Amino acid sequence: MTFFYLHLSLVRYHLILHLHAKPNARRNQLLPGPDGRWLVRLAAPPHDGQANAVLVAFLAEVFGVPRRDVTLLSGHTAPFKKVQISGLAEAAGAAVLARYGAAGG
């Protein structure tokens, strides 16, 4: 089961993801978590915002959007993060999450 929230603004679509970030991984991965949040393993340390920068770049790559369209809304210093991805149609966001849910990252 995929949990994500989709909000429609006047101009663009916004996908809101609730993530659990784990820094210091061997590689970046996006995995479905047992609690409905997505687990993101990040190949960066949690110091000086390095893991957050990698998170933004990794999600931009995964969803095929520019980095400027990925915004960390909350959780700047915590493992539980809320991230907004702008400019993504509902079907495209659901397809990416389904692919990562089925493939396991």
Image: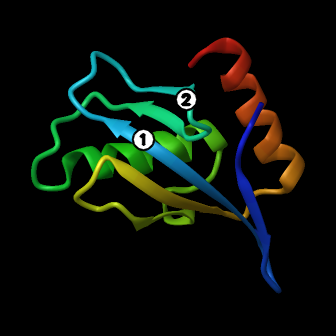
Tag count in the figure?
2
Residue 65 % position (x, y): 63, 52
Task: Give coordinates of residue 46: x percent, y percent.
Answer: 17, 43
Residue 43: mark in rendering: none
Q: Is residue 68 above or below residue 10?
A: above
Residue lying at 31% horizontally and 51% vertically, measured from the top left: 53
- Pinpoint residue 16: horizontal percent, then vertical percent: 63, 60
Query: Horizontal placement of 18 versus 58: left or right?
Result: right
Q: Quadrant of residue 3?
A: top right
Mark 1 surroundings within 10 Å by alpha-carbon count, few (fewer than 14), some (14 through 19), many (20 or more) = many
Give me the C-alpha separation between circle 2 and circle 1.
Answer: 8 Å
Relative image position of residue 44 (x, y in whole percent) = 22, 34
- Looking at the image, is 101 positioned above or below residue 67? above
Q: Earlier in the sequence, mark 2 or mark 1?
A: 1
Whether tag 2 and tag 1 are in contact, CB under 8 A, the answer is yes
Q: Secondary structure at mark 1?
A: strand
Q: Which residue of the protein is positioned furthest toward the right in this rendering?
A: 91
Q: What is the quadrant of the N terminus in the image? A: top right
Q: Is residue 96 left or right of residue 25?
A: right
Q: Nearer the viewer, residue 10 or 33?
A: 33
Badge 1 is on which residue? 20
Residue at the far front: name it: 35
Please determine whether, in this image, residue 81 is positioned above or below residue 25.
Answer: below
Please state which amino acid type lies under the numbered disc 2.
Gly
| In the foreground, 81 or 84 | 81
- Quadrant location of the C terminus? top right
Pointer 2 local density, CA inside 10 Å: few below 14, some 14–19, many at least 20:
some
Q: How is the image coloured?
A: rainbow
Location of mark 2 (residue)? 33
Q: Tell me which residue sits at (19%, 55%) in the image.
A: 49
Q: Secondary structure at mark 2?
A: loop
